[in-house]
Image (cartoon, helix red, strand yellow):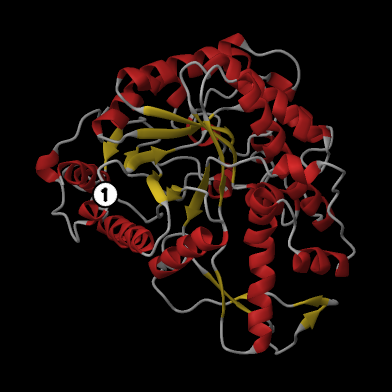
Amino acid sequence: MTTSLDRSSAPEPRADVGSRFPTDFLWGVATSAYQIEGAELEDGRTASIWDTFSRVPGATFGGHTGEVACDHYHRMPEDVDLIAGLGVDSYRFSLSWPRIQPGGKGPANARGLAFYDRLVDRLLERGVLPWVTLYHWDLPQELEDAGGWPARDTAHRFADYAEIAMNALGDRVSWWTTLNEPWCSAVLGYETGRHAPGRQDFGDSMAAVHHLLLGHGLAAQRLRETAPGPIQVGITLNTAHTLPATDAPEDAVAARRADGLGTRVYTDPLVHGSYPVDVVDDLAARGVQLPVQDGDLSVIAQPLDFLGVNYYTSHYFSGTDEDGRREVDGLPVVRQVLQGLPVTAMDWEITPHGFTDLLVRLGRDYPGVPLYVTENGAAFDDRVGPDGGVDDADRTAYFVEHLAAVADAREAGADIRGYFAWSLLDNFEWSYGYDKRFGIVHVDYETQARTVKQSGLWFADTIRRNREA
């Protein structure tokens, strides 16, 4: 396994973006539990919704599952050495809820917690700041069977789980993210069915939005009540950067609708303590009401020590379908339109300019909340070369452009304090299985050998240059 960097093969730095950031800027890499850990049923872990969903025929590419993934559960010490070798300041990782609290209720699982004890200790020994995410989509299957995120009780169960995690790790972990991308959990999981648990009900999806946010607020309260010392608590969103495809008024309306359900339905209650009026009205027109109870919004609007921002691409919207209709089946058209730009292996257009605009907008609309880029990266069709290396120049170019976009946003006044590359490792990419590779470290899934790609070498060199500036 590669645990150190051979900088003799590092690419020449292009557009030395590291020099555009202060020396106290936080540099990191990120992963999530289900995508890398494996050890599906070891040491008391029970099934999550992704264990169940990935075994539904046709749900994932090739029927792939996270049963083994990157085998990080068994290879953690070497992986931490690899992380430290990159020279990053911090490692953002998620805890597996069904590993820590099997079934989502009841006492902690000591064997599951022991793994995260060892991980945190190893990171600190190597001088790497642990940055914990409580929930990255692996809801215990038993809680889904009881209603999942559309059920209010799940939010309370999440707060209990947060307390377990704090009691176990709070003496050494000070950075806590409650949820990762609740939009994906709610919309892809309960409306489109593309992600676990695979349900398709718009009303359930919107109930899930509210209960995810309520769960965040309850967990934030519980974390602060039980923390043994000062902590930083935030949430990570994949806020949508939405633009009208043309100057047509109907396209502006479509972009507003997409922004409402992609960004403001989360950020407004989190920061301002209220749902956007236009979103509430749009939902009412569809016969849907958010299940808000007295006191919920004040719980959701707990003070944020930071807002995590995940960004991959921008989206352009049209208010008409390809036949020019503004409504289909009684619903207004909100259709994404591609702009003919270069794309990644996910067919996502590469739009670094949108990254700057989004970060500046968040800083303007939600002032006083520090921003951290908690995910940014790209999938490309990597190949291991004859020399055993991975020359992923396209990914390196993506990082150059997007880090420059972050620097531009900072210079325009956005309070951005850190950047985490997604992802440390090639891994289980949800419904895409192992077909898409986002890592700056290549993983051979048959041998589990790790190889730092050229983008990883470039990232490490950029961090080094930043510190020497």
Locate residue 468 relative to residue 88 in the image: left or right: left
Asked whether residue 325 is in view, the answer is yes
Locate residue 160 relative to residue 201 in the image: left or right: left
**In x, y percent, where is residue 38?**
51, 27
Report the front residue among 455 and 233.
Answer: 233
Locate residue 234 relative to residue 327 in the image: left or right: left
Q: Could you tell me which secondary element the residue under label 1 belongs to? A: helix
Extreme residue in the right direction: 287
Q: Label 1, on which residue?
A: 455
128 in relation to 170, above or below? below
Report the front residue among 367 and 331.
Answer: 367
Report the front residue among 241 and 71.
Answer: 241
**In x, y percent, where is residue 145?**
82, 33
Locate residue 3 relative to residue 381 in the image: left or right: left
281 in relation to 96, above or below? below
Extreme residue in the left direction: 8
